[in-house]
Amino acid sequence: MTVNVDDFKQALQLWASGVTVVTTRSEKFGTQGMTVTAFSSVSVEPPQILVCINDRADTGEGIHESQCFAVNVLAADQQEVSNQFAGGSSQQQRFENTAWQPGVTGAPILSDSLMSLECTVVDKVRAGTHWIIIGAVQHCVCRSGEPILYYRGAYRQLALA
Ligand SMILES: Cc1cc2nc3c(=O)[nH]c(=O)nc-3n(C[C@H](O)[C@H](O)[C@H](O)COP(=O)(O)O)c2cc1C
């Protein structure tokens, strides 16, 4: 017995999340990045996180090649960055229009993001249409600001109580 796909999608829309841009750099594919909300912490000691990447995503292929990636958590004013990295622009345009610098693994760190985690791949698991990619966190950078949120198919801002 499996849930109806539309019911499943509708249910998942009620899950509020932050928004990240996952980046990588490889000799074969150059700099790549894509918008990802499927991000979670996994373990504190050792520090590990995961991202879920569609097997058709170019950036996923780049991560398999480079074996490293960065997770950049977007700030409240980075809706346009999210849209560009979700397919609104070519890979070249995405990085031309966004301030970045290479991190310790070589993966691009977005300068204006709220937080960046630089990771090496420790494992990947195939699950349906996606790869669950588990990363060992090598370095992290925190900046000040508020996050952008994604809920019911739209970007949102934190409401301070
Ligand atoms: C808000 C938002 C969240 C997304 N989250 C994911 C995600 O968690 N995993 C994924 O594979 N694609 C996700 N996508 C879709 C990818 O960002 C998009 O397909 C991207 O262009 C694929 O990257 P590529 O250009 O490297 O092929 C998301 C898109 C948006 C707008």
Image: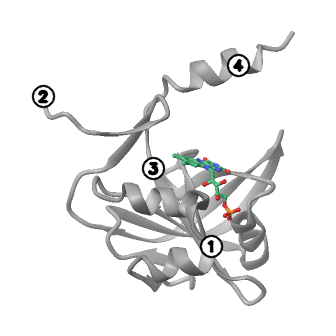
Q: Which residue is mark 4?
A: 6
Quadrant placement of the C terminus? top left
Q: Seen in the image, is 31 located left or right of residue 129?
A: left
Circle on res. 90: 1
Give the distance between the C-alpha atoms of the residues marked 2 and 1, in whole angstroms. Answer: 39 Å
Residue 88 spot, x, y in % from top left: 56, 61
Which sits earlier in the primary sequence, circle 4 or circle 2?
4
Give the distance between the C-alpha atoms of the residues marked 1 and 3, in whole angstroms. Answer: 19 Å
Pointer 3 and pointer 2: residues touching (CB < 8 Å)?
A: no
Residue 67 spot, x, y in % from top left: 72, 74
Which sits earlier in the primary sequence, circle 2 or circle 1?
1
Give, as a three-letter code, the residue at label 3.
Val
Front tag of 2 and 1: 1
Give, as a three-letter code, the residue at label 2.
Ala
Q: Which residue is mark 2?
A: 161
Q: Residue at x 59, y 81 (%)?
A: 92
Q: Which residue is mark 3?
A: 19
Mark 3 Cβ inside 8 Å of ligand 1: yes
Q: Residue furthest front?
A: 88
Secondary structure under badge 2?
loop
Residue 128 spot, x, y in % from top left: 83, 39
Give the distance between the C-alpha atoms of the residues marked 1 and 4, in whole angstroms. Answer: 30 Å
Residue 61 spot, x, y in % from top left: 78, 68
